[in-house]
Each structure stands twice: as structure tokens, then as C-alpha cells.
Amino acid sequence: MSLPILTQIRQAVWTAVEANTQLDGLIQGRFHWDDSGATLLPDMVPALGDLPALSIYPVSVATPWLTNQQQMIANVLEIKLWTPELSVRLPELLWQLFCRAVWADGTGVRAQSTASFIVEDLIVTAPAAFTRLPLTDDEGDTVTMTQCQWNVTFNVRWNPRTDATLNGTLTIE
């Protein structure tokens, strides 16, 4: 049993994040956007107790053919980060730890390439769109959090013609 190729790519990012002990220890809220159990809608913000929080959401995909056997999947994921204070330094630190996680030699996304897909390249943009968002704490006081986001683009070589042989039956978990 196997997951769809785009889900495998997205989950490879989560695996890399969770393998980086420093980043994993700092992130409290995680929003995976899987088919079931989603706890946050794309336009909502996490609760104060979930901060810092990270969201990985698919934005776009292009799949041009390279040869008669292989496609290059250009998969763009949007990463949103919420931190519990008005700060630029903390989001910048978490972004840099994120970059280290996805690029890590032994546990990064490229290291998770399999027979079914090969990560050729990945590009992480710098954090942008810093926004201050009001949030009500448990005592009814208004506090402010910082939200920023960046994109990760993966260029993944994939052979859809051998996918069934390599991945077997697709499942929804």
C-alpha cells in the first residue's frame, strides 16, 4: 500500500522537519492538511498554546514530460509560520532551521528519494509577508502574534508508467 506521489513529497518535508531535533523541539503546532483530521482551515490562525506553529500546504504543481517515460514534477508548497510575539528574529531563526532540515544529508528531503521518485532540486524562498495578528489569550486580553510564509519548490523526477509496480495500491490514511 502506498500514498500518492504528491503526498509522499509533502510528507518527506514533515519527516525532515521532525528529524531536526532543534526545529522539532521548537515547533508546538503542526498543520499537515491531510485528508482527515485537519484542525485548522487555510485562512485561520492557530491558538496561542500551539505557537510557534508550522503549516505545509500545497500551492501548485506542474508536470512536464522529460522523456517518454519520465515527468518532472514541479511541486510548490507554502510554508506558514506563526510565532507568539512581535518578532522578526524568531521567524528568521525557525526559517533557517527549516532550511537546514530539508537540506540535511541523512534526513533531508533529498535523502528520502526512493525508487518511485527522485528529488532533483529544491528551492526555499526567504520568509516574507510578515504580518501581525491579534489573538485573545485565556484571560480575554489581546496579544499579538507574528505570521510569515515562504515557499519550497521541489523538482522531482517521477516515472508514472512504473508507479503502480513500485508503489502498489494507493491508499488514503
Image (cartoon, rainbow, N blue to C red):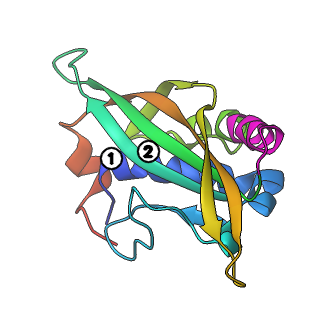
Please, what is the three-letter code of the amino acid marked with disc 2?
Ile
- Disc ID at residue 5: 1
Which image quarter: residue 37?
bottom left
Please, what is the three-letter code of the amino acid marked with disc 1?
Ile
**Neighbours of disc 1 within 10 Å: few (<14), some (14-19), many (20+):** some
Residue 15 in picture, x, y percent from top left: 60, 54
As drawn, which residue projects farthest toward the bottom?
139
Left or right for 165, reference 136: left
Question: Residue at point 24% right, 49% down?
Answer: 165
- The N terminus - image quarter: bottom left
Residue 125 in the image: above or below residue 53: above
Question: Residue at point 67% right, 81% down?
Answer: 140
- Disc ID at residue 15: none
Stretch of the chain drawn in magenta: 86-99
Q: Looking at the image, which is closer to me, 100 or 46?
A: 46
Which image quarter: residue 61?
top left
User: Are the two marked residues, 2 and 1, in contact with CB atoms closer than 8 angstroms?
Assistant: yes
- The C terminus - image quarter: bottom left
**Neighbours of disc 2 within 10 Å: few (<14), some (14-19), many (20+):** many
- Disc ID at residue 9: 2
Prevalent SS, magenta region: helix
Res 162 visible: yes
- Magenta stretch contains residue 87: yes
